[in-house]
Amino acid sequence: MKAVIFGNNQINVMETQVPGQKQGEALVKVYMAGICGTDIEIFNGYAEFSGTPGHEFAGIVEAAPGYPELLGKRIVADINCGCGECRWCRHGDARHCESRRVIGIRGINGAFAEYLSVPVKNLHFIPDSVDNLRAVFAEPLAAALEIAQQIHIKNTDRVAVLGDGKMGLLAAIALKHYTGNLLLAGRYPEKLAIAEDQRIDTVRIGRKEPDKDIARRLGQFDMVVEATGSPAGINTALALVRPKGRIIVKSTSRSPSQIDFSGVVVDEIHIVGSRCGDIDLALRFLEHRWVDVAALVEKIYPFSGFTEAFERARQKGSLKVLLDINDSGTPQSNSF
Amino acid sequence: MKAVIFGNNQINVMETQVPGQKQGEALVKVYMAGICGTDIEIFNGYAEFSGTPGHEFAGIVEAAPGYPELLGKRIVADINCGCGECRWCRHGDARHCESRRVIGIRGINGAFAEYLSVPVKNLHFIPDSVDNLRAVFAEPLAAALEIAQQIHIKNTDRVAVLGDGKMGLLAAIALKHYTGNLLLAGRYPEKLAIAEDQRIDTVRIGRKEPDKDIARRLGQFDMVVEATGSPAGINTALALVRPKGRIIVKSTSRSPSQIDFSGVVVDEIHIVGSRCGDIDLALRFLEHRWVDVAALVEKIYPFSGFTEAFERARQKGSLKVLLDINDSGTPQSNSF
């Protein structure tokens, strides 16, 4: 089969063996995969991962020794593969297992390949009404919904989402289910328009606009979601949040942030890191069409166009680039 | 009366008028005042405060127009003087009032003077069994107890307090009432001994010991209180906290911290800023002798020795330096 490997600042598409299954693993044929900001960070050296990246995907189970009921099922997957024995795994939260493998990120090959092996316990069935294109969004949408699992949001809370990238847009789309008072602040009119189409209020902020000026213009927020992808985004969030307010951090930048903690102390701010979420919850949102994720697709490429697709994903301001890996028949244009 | 003014990197003890009282204010004769790290920061330019500093004090009401019942009462005070009208003040939390004055820190003269004027609503009566020396600790002890007001601490939570300065020691002394699994990590054997005397487990960490080595040696904590006073302390806290754990930040350093937020995101860490607390709660702890704060006194100086006292307070590793401002008769040595 064909599989992508990163190495020496190069993308290599190799011919390799279809992976075998250990006890409790399923062979998944990949239909559709998404390129995430983390994949680009991995290409740049993040997490020192060597192997096949790709952790946003939808596929079908082609083999699952001991689990015949899984055969032929369309699935998405939790990306965190826990040890099964530590206190985290015993409580059903493999996301924080210290010896976890993470699909396409740490210790286990990912979905930029025709096939991959996935622990059976990580599989989630895709409802029939959710097509592959939308199912790929289950993983990042779950990460966006995770915010409301960590923090109690009241309908009257004034919430700002900073950043109109993929995570910022998904966070705004997800959080409009929790507050009636949401503002998405971003830089790209065409991306803010996607949110406007989903009846989310937006505002444009300038690339060099000082945080104080932004705060003067937008006022104070009970909660700010930092999804700019920039190490300086936390400072904008701190300028916007009210005393005793909450900042949810989604950006994983490789550069350190410079922050003045005396403001955090004096105003008793809560800062909460937020990562992966509940895949089944995300699938339910997709099944009921509570969110429209198709509008977030930049372009769908065939697997043979991976290099081109990756370049497109790396362009500043690009939306979700998808790969139709095994020619699943999803439309190749944006006319879905 | 005599009052201290900071200016041009100098301490000036001036002769000035006893302050008059506006509606709702009381004239307080200062018995005892404490020098806090914030006073040293103010001397160095923090908060751009011009006036008389000093916000930890115990005194007696000598005038209170319209409030005869206050005359002759020994008091401590909430340092945050709110506008009385904003949403914070309406909910009884002047600490976050945007136009607040803060005694000895912002817009209102403090307690390094023979007398000061304090809003009547900020006064708290000192129980008879609490002497002036101990009452001065009500303000910083309230700040230490604030941690357990912001965060639910379980008796089984493994908690580390970083820093054996005044706030670190007070935090450890306060938090032993909330968890049976507390460790104070500091640099000074003589200060760790004070905590040991109060049956708190301690550990010494080296000034240049890398955070990773400290983490390997001490293991993981459910909660870490950052009270080092150093901008790098937050990184030690991040190294020690478990996934989904909580860091309470007490340090208000004027220098920015450099932190890697990707760790905060991946491990879904909660970081909580923590400032002033509930004075009455602190007075109750002092009244019942649940805590022994007298052990934290470095030395008591007469007011005429202010400059010397301030130098002593600025020395690295010094404990609480007190000023016996109106010769209240508290012992002048450490033999209390």
Image (cartoon, coloured by chain):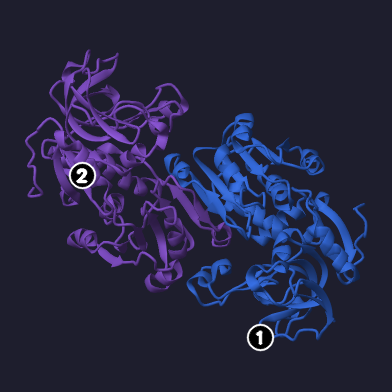
Chain colours: A purple, B blue
User: Could you classify mark 2 by the number of other residues whose Cα lies within 10 Å: few (under 14), some (14-19), or many (20 or more)?
Assistant: many
Residue B114 shows in this picture: no
Which residue lies at the image location 47% right of the left edge and 44% below the top edge? B264
x and y percentages locating residue B154 in the rendered image: 56, 40
Residue labelled with disc 2: A321
Residue labelled with disc 1: B23
Q: On the same chain: label 2 and label 1? A: no
**Which mark is on residue A75?**
none
Judged left or right of residue A110, residue B314 is right
Q: CA distance from mark 2 to mark 1?
A: 66 Å
Which residue lies at the image location 82% right of the left edge and 64% below the top edge? B310
Q: Secondary structure at mark 1?
A: loop
Q: Nearer the viewer, residue B193 or B238?
A: B238
Q: Chain of mark 2?
A: A
x and y percentages locating residue B214 in the rendered image: 63, 34
Judged left or right of residue A16, residue B27 is right
Q: Nearer the viewer, residue A95 or B232?
A: B232
